Amino acid sequence: MATVMPAVPQISLQGVHKKYPNGTVALRDVTLVIPKQDFVFLVGPSGAGKSTLVRLLIREEKVTAGKIHVEGQDLSRLKRRHLPYLRRKIGMVFQDFKLLPNLSVFQNVAFALRVTEGALRHLKPKVEEVLSIVGLEGKENKFPDQLSGGEQQRVAIARALVHDPRIFLADEPTGNLDPATSWEIIQLLLQINARGTTVLMATHNREIVDVMRRRVVAIESGQIVRDEDAGGYHAPALESR
Amino acid sequence: MHRLWNRVDFAFSSAWQNFWRNAAVSIASVLIVWVVLLALGSLLLVLHSLDQIVALEKTKASAISVYLADTTPLSSAMDFKLHLESDPRVTAVTYVSKDQAMARFRQLPALDPSVIDTLGTNPLPASLDVTVRDIRDLGAIDQEVRNSPLVDKSPSTNYEPNVIDKIILLARVAGIAGLVLIVGLTGLSVFIIMLTIRTAIYLRRKEIEVMKLVGATDWFVRWPFIVEGLFVGVVGAVVAVLIVGFGYRPAVVNLQSVLIFVPLSFDQYYLRLVLAAMLLFGLLLGSVGSYLGVRRFLKQ
């Protein structure tokens, strides 16, 4: 669907190599363009390089060779002091939620606004707004250990949304969740996508990928082996077997 | 304004939480800062007292008191005074009677007058206070006057050639020993503050990870730890300042009563300087320790 009109690339990787200091080559010559408002599944076996790709996009890691542009910025040229401002444009969620256990739901979300020095006058309405988007009204005062896995992931999503990110990266967001809860989280990501945010989701969840029929980028041994619109978890040849 | 307040509020409340979350390490670091500053303050005051003594002894050094035997009549004493005054090496001679000597003695700091009264008679000799042009002539004059029959034999004069050298040496040894002690303790305290900050960082690593993930700036992440280091420095300094501030006067008074012939005095102005220096040094220890503590992390 992104190919109908010449879409503006929001994320682009050109010939990206990533080699870790221990010698492991995580990505080889990866070229990938993701236009605005796209919804992309990043699939592949463990250790294929999915998480490395996600980490490169928020520049938690730097490329060994090649170029990455996010929101028009060349990440290899981005100064360290400008990095926080890039990250405010990117919402991120993980398999392990990364919530702070000693903070309530409200505080966990508000924390993201506080530490980025957002306008505090709008803190409460903003937190309430994102909590209602993820369907957690009435649970503001609960602590993470009082919530189900799905609810915890919703808190993490709400936290990622407080800066109205233009890009939403999800690294195995359903990895710890049962199938029904996983579907709820996917619905939420679709909603976020429908509001105009680009979503990139790295996943192992074959069922979801197959049912959704969205763009699928498959990575194996650090290389993109397949990139198709409305794809499945496995290549058509494999699926027909 | 809101943002600045948010930053300050966050830094201080996090620092406060950090401080109590690893209370044992924090209190250890406060204690070590306290010890360093107590040592520093005490050393500065002791050296200052030694300086006071040296300065006073130096002004006294160009003069000696020649003690006259109680049997010497006043006329002979006056002749002896004239004889000394005619000496080209001498600039002035003052006669001090037994009563004047007693009056001077009574003025010594912290000397209990009742102690003197119990003596009944006045044991102090009259004297001729001889001031010379050149300190180096004191020895020769001392030798000459000792031979005079008018002069008391036990002792003849108050000439003590080595006393100044001894005091200066004492001040130097005390200064060097104190400096070595303070340098060692300073290193130790910076190291312990660094460990405190590292522990705080370790305990907050998850929070820091989230902060960086959602786009907090490096300085926003660092400030709480720097504030914690400064907090440790200030608390240690304030306790030490209170002890030295309130302890100096009683210490001087006590020493005056023990060392009655040593011209110690309480110096309010110098005390203020020392207290200010201690507070500044406390802040310095805190900031250097926390700087070293946060330096390595956040750098990747």
Image (cartoon, coloured by chain):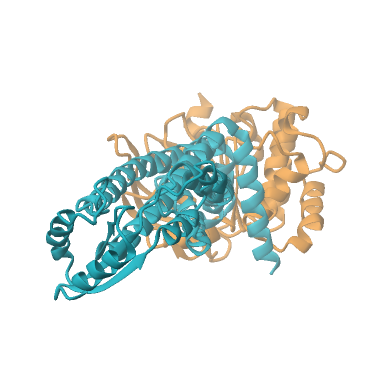
Chain colours: A orange, B cyan
Q: Residue at x 38, y 44 (%)?
A: B186
Q: Is residue A236 left or right of residue A129?
A: left
Nearest to the observer: residue B29 or residue B70: B70
At x 69%, y 32%, the residue is A182
For residue A23, which quarter of the picture? top left
Q: Up-down: is B67 above or below B128?
A: above
**Does residue A124 appear left or right of residue B31 in this picture?**
right
- Residue A163 x, y percent position in the rendering: 66, 57
Locate residue A144: give its quadrant: top right
Determine if residue A184 is in view. yes
Image quarter hosting the N terminus of chain B:
bottom right
x%, y% of residue A27? 36, 42
- Residue B201 or residue A240, whichever sits in front: B201
- Using the image, determine if residue A1 lies above or below residue A173: below
At a point 65% along the width and 41% down the height, the residue shown is: B17
Front one among B44 and A192: B44
